[in-house]
Image (tube, rainbow, N blue to C red):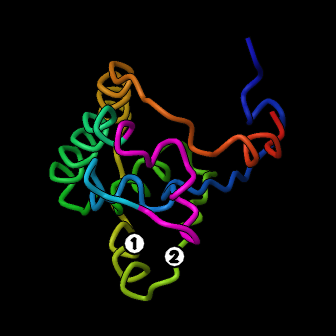
Amino acid sequence: MFPTLEELGIDFVAYSPLGRGYLTGVFDENSRFALPDRRAVLPRFTPQAMKHNAPLLDLVRKWAKLKDVTPAQFSLVWALSQRPYIVAIPGTTKIAHLDELCGAKGVRMNKEEIAKFDKEYAKIDILGHRANEAIEAQIDK
């Protein structure tokens, strides 16, 4: 069993959940990306992976509706609800997206909701890595 962050003395974790817009609910198997957009080379953004992973997007949309937020906001809500020491780092290049993400402020999931979401999420088989081979090779595992 691995020690908890508390046991290791770690009291601050930064997490970036937004994943190049993957969980916003904007893209589907009909979405196409061309270079220089990095999504053009990411396995999770292929039409096949997007179609296969539709249940994940459906789950995020369902929970976003339950929490009365957008799918993008829900991604932040989920991350921020995990532990009090987690700080989400949403990445965006558009002011409108930043404004949208700010709408997640103050919305949280309780332990029961997190457990229910996690149980539903565990049933979903995700196709495609978040990064391509070149990026994966740079990630400290």
Assign the N terminus to one quadrant of the image: top right
State which tag comes first along the sequence, 2 or 1: 2
How many residues crowd mark 2 within 10 Å: few (<14), some (14–19), many (20+)?
few
- Give coordinates of residue 3: x percent, y percent: 77, 22
Assign the C terminus to one quadrant of the image: top right
Alpha carbon distance from label 2 to label 1: 9 Å
Tell me the SS state at disc 2: loop
The residue wearing badge 1 is 101
In the depicted structure, whether residue 73 falls above or below residue 85: below
Residue at the (39%, 22%) spot, across then down? 125
Q: In this view, does 35 lie to the left or right of 124?
A: right
Q: Is residue 126 left or right of residue 70?
A: right
Tell me if label 2 and label 1 are in contact, CB under 8 Å: yes
Residue at the (33%, 73%) spot, across then down? 103
The residue wearing badge 2 is 92
Amino acid bearing label 2:
Thr
Viewer-nearest residue: 48 or 86:
48
Tell me the SS state at disc 1: helix
> Looking at this rendering, what residue extends furthest in the top direction?
1
- Give coordinates of residue 71: x percent, y percent: 29, 57
How many residues crowd mark 1 within 10 Å: few (<14), some (14–19), many (20+)?
many
- Give coordinates of residue 8: x percent, y percent: 83, 33
Amino acid bearing label 1:
Leu
**Membership of 108 in magenta stretch:** no
Q: Is residue 117 left or right of residue 42?
A: left
> Which of pointers 2 and 1 indicates the residue nearer the eye?
2
**Membership of 36 in magenta stretch:** yes
Residue at the (36%, 59%) spot, across then down? 32
> Looking at this rendering, what residue extends furthest in the bottom direction?
95
In the depicted structure, whether residue 61 falls above or below residue 92: above
In the depicted structure, whether residue 40 falls above or below residue 114: below
Q: Give the range drawn in magenta.
A: 33-49
